[in-house]
Each structure stands twice: as structure tokens, then as C-alpha cells.
Amino acid sequence: MQRALSISRQNFPEWYQAVVRDADMAEPSPVRGCMIIKPWGWGIWERMQALLDARIKATGHENAYFPLFIPLSFIAKEAEHVQGFAKEMALVTHHRLKEIDGKLVPDPEAKLEEPLIVRPTSETIIGDSFSRWIRSHRDLPVLINQWANVVRWEMRTRLFLRTSEFLWQEGHTAHANSEEAVEETMRMLEQYRAFAEDDVAMPVIAGEKPANERFPGAVATYSIEAMMQDGKALQAGTSHYLGTHFSEAQNIRFQNDSGELQYCHTTSWGMSTRMIGGVIMTHGDDDGLRLPPAIAPRQIVIVPMLRDKPEDAQVLEYGHALVKELSGKFALDEKIRVLLDTKHIKSSEKRWNWVRRGAPIIVEIGPRDVANGQVTFMRRDMLRDGDKVKSQAMARDEFVAKMPALLEEMQKSLHAEARTRMDSNIRSDIKTFSDLEAYFGAGSDDDAGEFKGWVRAGWAKPEGAALDAVDARLKALKLTLRNVPADGMKAGGTCIFGGGDAKEDILIARAY
């Protein structure tokens, strides 16, 4: 039986690249480290954007847009921030080109008075606006979200997961006090958790990042961490409480009800196109991509089996009627998205194109289906039984009636499958660093190696030089601290790094 991909998940990095390519999602651009997102990949991002944008607006935030270019002086005002992003920033120094000796070069006379940073994140430029918008406590809170592209110069790139330019949303808010700002930080972390679990069918663990993993300039950083099918962690979204650090740098102040000037407490939070990479690595199989119905641009794809014969007209008529019936149904609180693929290529090739792309329901109709008033379809979440493709026939009316419930069932099924995999591969029985080293292997590169899950262990929450020492020991094993799970202390006992009493649990994993 033909397989959709030539590479299995046992070679996970190559498999990932094959899925992106064969699902026709994206390709490298002529600019190193950047990508071209093709229509199917863009359609997935549009679905994610629509669902997440609705959640953001439902919590009272408004969308706005801020400049791509940020004056260097703005970045330099926040020392920790500039230090954190200095190696990733792209710089614009001239505003014009000139032909000199037959070559286009920056015009020496067009040097900018102040260099401009290509937006790596927008805390500083948005903070400048906040400093003008906010005067009184009556102006607070300010709740802003931006959908934009950002640039962080990357040396080692992978489509969707890590590119020099990527797309995201970034929320920025200002509040009168720390309590309100922390509440906002946690509210948006919960929105990310719900979006990942309910819309993307990607189970995650929410928690606070350790100090060495905080966003540059933040008081506290929180994340949702998802387990990929190779056992690695993916940081799928972050929410930051920034305290008054950026307010002090950008002079974001308000007059309180006593007439005194105070600095605002600010937050920021973001989720990016790396979530598409997470979808691939959470749900994909050896036949390609599998999409949760909520984020599939087309939930049902109908493939007419055309043979350049007179009966083709009846098959197409049957297909169009089926599209009309299905499009009037609702699933997951939206109208079902249906496509009749009428491209003039072999029906078997069309079918595998949609298998590779991960369309949740793939329907094949031919003259026999028309004559019997039925449809033949396959569920992408359970495509195979060994080498045999699993498909089933159903009366047309029954099929149309059952599709809303079936799509919702598939959404839950993909989440349950991923949840079981994550929960069963987080170990809490590793209590010493030597056991940790033995489990993961000392410094081994596991890209194409044996599956390793995560370790949840107690730790003493070291700070400063002690935390740096822990980080160095983990880096030697290619491990990182992910977050402190918000569900409390379960591993308990002693610190895995020093043997003293543990203060909290920490997740340890290899990561993207």
C-alpha cells in the first residue's frame, strides 16, 4: 500500500521537514532563515489567529499596530532587555542605496542619524506610546494586542519552529498596581492554556519559568509547555509580569486618586507561528500531518473520482449537493468548512495530497456512490490499520447528519491521544542528578535517537551563582529547566541538584 511519506517518525528531524514539504505548508525563502508560508500553512495560521484573537478580545483587549522600526535609544533604555536581545537584533543604518563602481551599496551620505532596530519585540516602542496615552488612574488599565511580524536573527533555523522572521501576537498592558498586573499575566496564561488544549488539541503544562529563563527585563515569566512526539518540550506561549522596569525606562506614569505620580505595572505576552510546528510534532503520523478540526482550513474534503466519462457530470453534481448540505451544518460552534476538489489529477493522487495535509475527513465519491446514495470516507485521526487504509461507506443522509458530532469527537480524540502520551512520559521517580544523567545520557544528541520524556523533580529553587551552576550542569546534558508546574508540589522530597529539601517541583527536558 502506498505511503504518504517516505520518512518515518523514527528519524524525527527529517520526518518533520518532510511533513512541512509534503503537506505543502511552507518553504525556505531566498533570505536565509526566513520562510514562505504557502496557502495551506497560511490557512492553518488564519484559523489559529481567528480563534486566539476571539479569546483575546473576549478578555477586553483591543488590537492596534505599532512600527516595525524601533529607535536604538528606546531599546538601550532598558539594560537587561537590550542585553537579552543584543545578539538577535537586526539593525538599519542607512535610508538609501547608491551605485558606486557598478555596485549598489549604502549611500555614505544617507546614514541615519540614529540607527533603527527591526522589531524583535515591542515593549519599548509600545511603552513610548503608553507614556503619552496614560495620565490618570482613570486611563487604566490599558489593554492592547498587536498581530505582527518580528525579527530575531537566528543562526540555526527550522521552518515554523525557529526562523529569523516569524509571525505572532504580542499583548501589552498597563495597570495601577502589581496585583492587577499579576492577575492579567495569569489571565492571559490561562487563555493560552485553553487555546492550546481546546482549539489546538495540544495538552500543556502551565507554570512559572525559573529566573534564568525569564524574558529579559521581566519580574516573572510564565509558560505553557507541550510535549512533542520525540519527547522534547516546546514552549508554546509565554506571559510576563514586567513590574515597573519598563515604565521607569519609558516614563509610563499616572496620577493616582491622591494626586501622586506613580509608575504603571506592565505585562506582555505572546504566541507565534511556532505553534504550527507544535501541531505537526504533536499530531502528525507517518502519513503526514493530522489537523484538529478546529484549526483545519477545510474540515471535509470531497474527492470526486473522475474518469473523463459521461457519468462524471453526475458525480460532480452529487459532490456539489453534498458540499451545500454539509456547509449548512455547524460543528465546534462554526459552520463546517467543506471543499470539493475538482483538480484534473488522478483521484488517488488527490486523496493522498489531502492525507498528507491532514484534512480531518476525506470523502471519495464515484459513480457507485452516486447510484447507491452513499459516501465513502476516511477519518484522518485513525487512517490505518497496519498497511491497510481504513475507510467506511455510509448513507449520504446519515453521513451529513453525523458529521458535526464526528468532527467534535475527532477534536477530543486527538487531544486525548496527546494527553495520554504526555502524562505517561513524565517521570517523577528520578531523584538524583546521577540518575538524571543516566536517564538522558551524558550530553548525547538525541535528535534521531531513543525517545526520552520529561523529568519532574523537586528542587531547592537556587538563585544567582547556584542557579548558574545548575544551568551549566544541565547544558552539558543538553537539558533545560522548563517551568514550575502550577498544579503544586508532587515529586517532592529532596532537591535533585543538591540533595537539600525541595521547595517546589521543576520540569526538566530537552527542548526546541
Image (cartoon, rainbow, N blue to C red):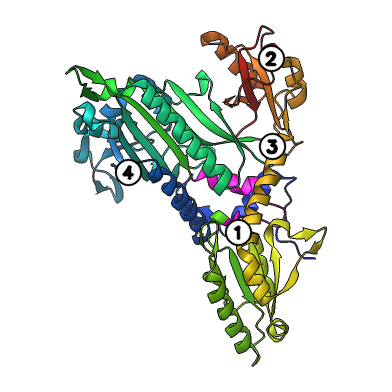
Residue found at x 65% / y 46%: 415
The residue stretch that appears in magenta: 273-293
Tag 2 and tag 1, C-beta contact below 8 Å? no
Q: Which residue is mark 1?
A: 23
Q: Are marks 1 and 3 in contact (CB under 8 Å)?
A: no
Q: Upstream in the sequence, badge 2 or badge 1?
A: 1
Q: Amino acid at mark 3?
A: Met
Q: Is residue 427 left or right of residue 181?
A: right
- Sequence order check: which comes first, mark 2 or mark 4? 4
Q: Amino acid at mark 2?
A: Ile
Looking at the rendered image, the disc whose residue lies closer to the viewer, 1 or 3, is 3
Q: Looking at the image, is mark 2 or mark 4 nearer the viewer?
A: 4
Q: Quadrant of the N terminus?
A: bottom right
Between circles 1 and 4, the one closer to the viewer is: 4
Q: CA distance from mark 1 to mark 3?
A: 25 Å
- Which tag is nearer the camera, tag 4 or tag 3? 4
> 257 and 67: which one is in front?
257
What residue would you read off at disc 3?
422
